[in-house]
Amino acid sequence: MVRDSERGSRPPAAGGPADALKEAVERTFQGAAGGAAGAQRRAQDLFDDVTSALQRLRESVDDRSAAEAVEQLREEVRALSDRVAALERAAAKPTTTKSKTTATRS
C-alpha cells in the first residue's frame, strides 16, 4: 500500500474514484482559467503595442503631409517671386520708342 507520505500533499479522495476525477477536472478548469487570463493579458499587451505603433505611423504620415505642403507652398512663393521680379524689370525699362519720337519732332 501507498503511505500518506508517499502520496504527496493532497489528502486522499473521500468518495473514491468519482470524487478524485471531479477534483482533477476542477483543477484542470482552474488552471485553464488562469492560463486564459494570462493569454488575455498578453493579447491586450499586443493590442496596445499595435495601437501605439499605428499612432506613431499616423503622426509620421501627418508630419510628412505637412512637410509636403510646406514644400509646395515654397515652390508657389518662388514662382510668384519670379513673376513679380519679371514685372518689376519690365516696369523699370524706359520706353525708348516714345522718347525717341518725341526727340525727333522737336
Image: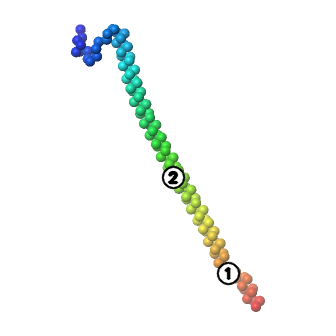
Residue at the disc numbered 1:
94
Q: Which mark is in front, 1 or 2? A: 2
Q: Is residue 91 left or right of residue 28?
A: right
Residue drawn at point x = 75 percent, y = 85 percent: 101
Residue drawn at point x = 54 percent, y = 52 percent: 65
Amino acid type, mark 2: Asp
Q: What crowding class fits label 1: few (fewer than 14 Cα within 10 Å), some (14-19), or many (20 or more)?
A: few
**Measured from the top left, where is residue 42 in percent x and y?**
41, 33
Foreground residue among 57 and 101:
57
**Measured from the top left, where is residue 94 in percent x and y?**
67, 81
Indicate the secondary structure of the residue bearing disc 2. helix
Which mark identifies residue 63? Answer: 2
Residue drawn at point x = 54 percent, y = 54 percent: 66
Between discs 1 and 2, the one toward the N terminus: 2
Q: What crowding class fits label 2: few (fewer than 14 Cα within 10 Å), some (14-19), or many (20 or more)?
A: few
Q: Is residue 58 left or right of residue 76?
A: left
Q: Is residue 84 left or right of residue 12?
A: right
In the picture, which quadrant includes the N terminus? top left
Distance of label 1 from label 2 (alpha carbons)? 49 Å
Q: Is residue 79 positioned above or below 29 on the image?
A: below
**Measured from the top left, where is residue 96 in percent x and y?**
70, 82
User: Which of the 4 quarters of the picture holds residue 73?
Assistant: bottom right
User: Which of the 4 quarters of the picture holds residue 78?
Assistant: bottom right
Residue drawn at point x = 24 percent, y = 11 percent: 2
Indicate the secondary structure of the residue bearing disc 1. loop
Amino acid type, mark 1: Pro
